[in-house]
Image (cartoon, coloured by chain):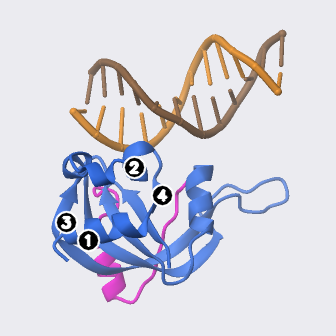
Chain colours: A blue, B brown, C orange
Amino acid sequence: MAYWLMKSEPDVFSFADLQAKTARNEPEEWTGVRNYAARNNMRAMALGDEAFFYHSNIGKEIVGIMQVVAAAHPDSTGERNAKGEVVWDCVDVAAIKPLPRPVTLATIKATPELAELELVKLSRLSVSKVSPDEWALLCKMGGL
DNA sequence: GCCAACGTTGGC
DNA sequence: GCCAACGTTGGC
């Protein structure tokens, strides 16, 4: 099982929004990613992989955990190429649980063990990888 | 609102 | 294929 971190601006789509959809049994398609590195990360995701939900811009904190419930498939909102194929991919996710104590970016930056976290090193990447050690530490910091 | 980082585009 | 210009993201 691999671990990931996915960003969303909460005024566009928040973890609470995801929880509401999950409660209604509606998978959320993580559409709108238009960056190849982020797309490749989504293509590397497997069913059951877990991901942190990070609120960018507003909050700047990890607020919850979600699970990949469908592997990468064409993003229906993506442009098509000359052959009519969708260029971009997305995965489906469902909320698992919120973090009892959200972990802020400031806290992450102040934690030496997390200096290599992709969220910090590649700050503009919207879908990034989290190592098992980083995952365990962040869960602990989040009160789990 | 500014700016740094970085991806993309387009001229050569 | 290089590189300058430009656009976007996201933290501050």
Residue A128 to residue A23: above or below: above
Instruction: Tell me the distance, in whole angstroms, between the alpha carbons under discs 2 and 3.
Output: 17 Å
Co-location on one chain, circles 4 and 3: yes
Which residue is identified by label 4? A127
Q: Image check: A135 left or right of C9?
A: left
Q: What residue would you read off at disc 1?
A: A139
Residue A90 is one of the magenta-drawn residues = no
User: Residue A109: percent from the left, percent from the top?
Assistant: 25, 46
In the image, residue A73 sits, relative to residue A33, either above or below, namely below
Q: Is residue C2 left or right of residue A48?
A: right
> Earlier along the polypeptide chain: callout 4 or callout 2?
2
Q: Earlier in the sequence, mark 2 or mark 3?
A: 2
Q: Are marks 1 and 4 on the same chain?
A: yes
| Chain under numbered label 3 | A
Residue at x 59%, y 52% (from the top left corner): A37
Q: Which residues are magenta?
A: A10-33
